[in-house]
Structure formats: structure tokens, C-alpha cells
């Protein structure tokens, strides 16, 4: 994936980085990734929203078994819809 931009978020005492990225190597589309970056140690990639240009599906994946604040997930899904889908305009 090629990173295009990075935004910082803060929820529940933790810092997160949202990255807009394109993927044309394994899929064809645009994704928004959310990484837990701290306090150290960060937990790495926790959420992904992806708009597939081939199937036109907007999908969501979680990569963490630990609970996340609902407000964080809700904001991430809304941000993904706004930045990745045609309906988000």
C-alpha cells in the first residue's frame, strides 16, 4: 500500500494514526487504516476500511481481539465512508 495521508486521533488514553492508502498490488481500491501507536508499546494495525474498485464493496476489518472504544470505531467507520465511498461526498 502507498500511504497518501496520516491523521492523529486520541481515544481512551491512547493515540491512533489513521492512514489513507491505495492498494493495487493485491486488491484494487482505496483503504483507510487505523493504527494504535501508543503509549508504547503500540498495538499496531487495529482497523481497516476498504473501498474495492472492482467489486464496489465497502468493507471493514478489525485486527485486534482487545476491546476498542465504541466512539473510536464509530468515528473510524464514518471517516472511512466519507473518504472512501461515493456516498460520502
Image: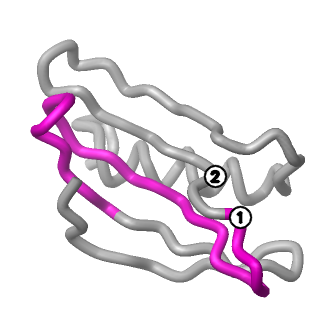
Q: Is residue 39 highlighted in magenta?
A: yes
Q: Residues within 10 Å of mark 1 (few under 14, many from 20)?
A: some
Q: Image check: 52 left or right of 82?
A: left
**Residue found 53% across the figure and 49% down from its top:** 78
Q: Which mark is residue 43?
A: 1
- Furthest toward the top, the residue is 55
Which stretch is magenta?
20-43
Query: Residue 22, relative to residue 85: is it above or below?
Result: below
Alpha carbon distance from label 2 to label 1: 7 Å
Residue 51 pos. (x, y %): 29, 33
Q: Which mark is residue 62?
A: none
**Residue found 76% across the figure and 85% down from its top:** 40
Number of numbered callouts drawn: 2
The quarter holding residue 56 reads top left
**Residue found 39% across the figure and 53% down from its top:** 32
Residue 67 pos. (x, y %): 88, 47
Q: Are marks 2 and 1 in contact (CB under 8 Å)?
A: yes
Query: Residue 33, relative to residue 11: is it above or below?
Result: above
Q: Nearer the viewer, mark 2 or mark 1?
A: 1
Q: Residues within 10 Å of mark 2 (few under 14, many from 20)?
A: some
Q: Image check: 29 left or right of 47?
A: left
Q: Secondary structure at mark 1?
A: loop
Q: Secondary structure at mark 2?
A: strand
Q: Image check: 69 left or right of 72?
A: right
Q: Is residue 42 highlighted in magenta?
A: yes
Residue carrying label 2: 46
**Residue found 32% across the figure and 19% down from its top:** 57
Query: Residue 75, relative to residue 57: is it above or below?
Result: below
Residue 62 pos. (x, y %): 64, 38
- Furthest toward the bottom, the residue is 39
Amino acid at each position: 500500500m502507498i500511504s497518501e495521508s496520516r491523521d492523529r486521533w486520541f481515544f481512551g488514553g491512547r493515540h491512533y494514526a489513521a492512514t489513507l492508502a491505495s492498494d493495487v498490488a493485491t486488491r484494487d481500491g482505496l483503504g483507510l487504516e487505523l493504527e494504535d501507536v501508543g503509549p508504547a508499546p503500540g498495538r499496531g494495525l487495529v482497523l481497516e476500511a476498504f473501498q474495492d474498485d472492482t467489486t464496489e464493496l465497502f468493507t471493514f476489518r478489525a485486527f485486534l481481539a482487545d476491546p476498542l472504544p465504541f466512539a473510536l470505531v464509530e468515528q473510524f467507520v464514518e471517516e472511512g465512508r466519507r473518504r472512501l465511498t461515493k456516498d460520502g461526498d
